[in-house]
Image: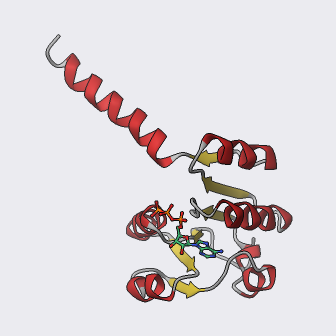
Amino acid sequence: SSVTSANAVAVIGLGRFGQSLALELMKDGAEVLGIDVREDVVQALNGQLTHVVAANATNEQVLRQLSVSEFDRVVVAIGSDIESSILVTSLLLRFSVPQIWAKAVSDAHGLILEQLGIPHVVYPEKDMGRRVAHIVLGSMQDFI
Ligand code: ATP
């Protein structure tokens, strides 16, 4: 969209996953808007992201005020609060955000996100387990 710059990303939920993601995006030159409902989490990241705001992302007006509705790329990094994850994701779909990534904490959660039409569902533990398996296999090939 014309309102946000081409390298802007909104990250909703700044737990271990969202924080690590947001900081890595910053390192690679992206403009990052981070949102978390917890004041302490937002305080801790203050100055480390382009913008970081304490807000409940399940509120449509809040997302509009923060112009999340105008972003081309949004990552929903809320996991264990599945209801919030689904509510936020559904709002982003209503805003027609072109690229949405969402974190799933279980296969059932991931299935719901996929059924909503999220093409990029991320399963951090499952995906990382698979990745480490390949690293272990790679180390074995050194000895074959
Ligand atoms: P992680 O594994 O990334 O640490 P988690 O599974 O332990 O995450 P989650 O429940 O996924 O914790 O929450 C990730 C972050 O999302 C938390 O910091 C939480 O405060 C935030 N969060 C949860 N609900 C909302 C919401 N409605 N609006 C904004 N932030 C939220």
| Whole-percent x, y for residue 112 in the image | 74, 47
Image quadrant occupied by the C terminus? top left
- Ligand 1 falls in which quarter? bottom right
| Whole-percent x, y for residue 142 in the image | 17, 19
Q: Residue furthest top?
A: 144
| Whole-percent x, y for residue 138 in the image | 26, 24
Compared with 42, 91 (above or below) is above
Image quadrant occupied by the N terminus? bottom right
- Residue occupying image coordinates x 80% and y 68%: 91
| Whole-percent x, y for residue 2 in the image | 74, 75
Taking 34 as reference, is 130 left or right?
left
Give the number of marks: 0
Taking 79 as reference, is 136 left or right?
left
Compared with 87, 137 (above or below) is above
Taking 16 as reference, is 141 left or right?
left
Q: In the picture, residue 57 is in which quadrant?
A: bottom right
Q: In the picture, residue 70 is in which quadrant?
A: bottom right
Q: Residue furthest left?
A: 143
- Residue occupying image coordinates x 43% and y 89%: 43
- Residue occupying image coordinates x 72% and y 49%: 113
Q: In the picture, residue 139 is in which quadrant?
A: top left
Closest to the observer, 119 or 103: 103
Closest to the observer, 15 or 3: 15
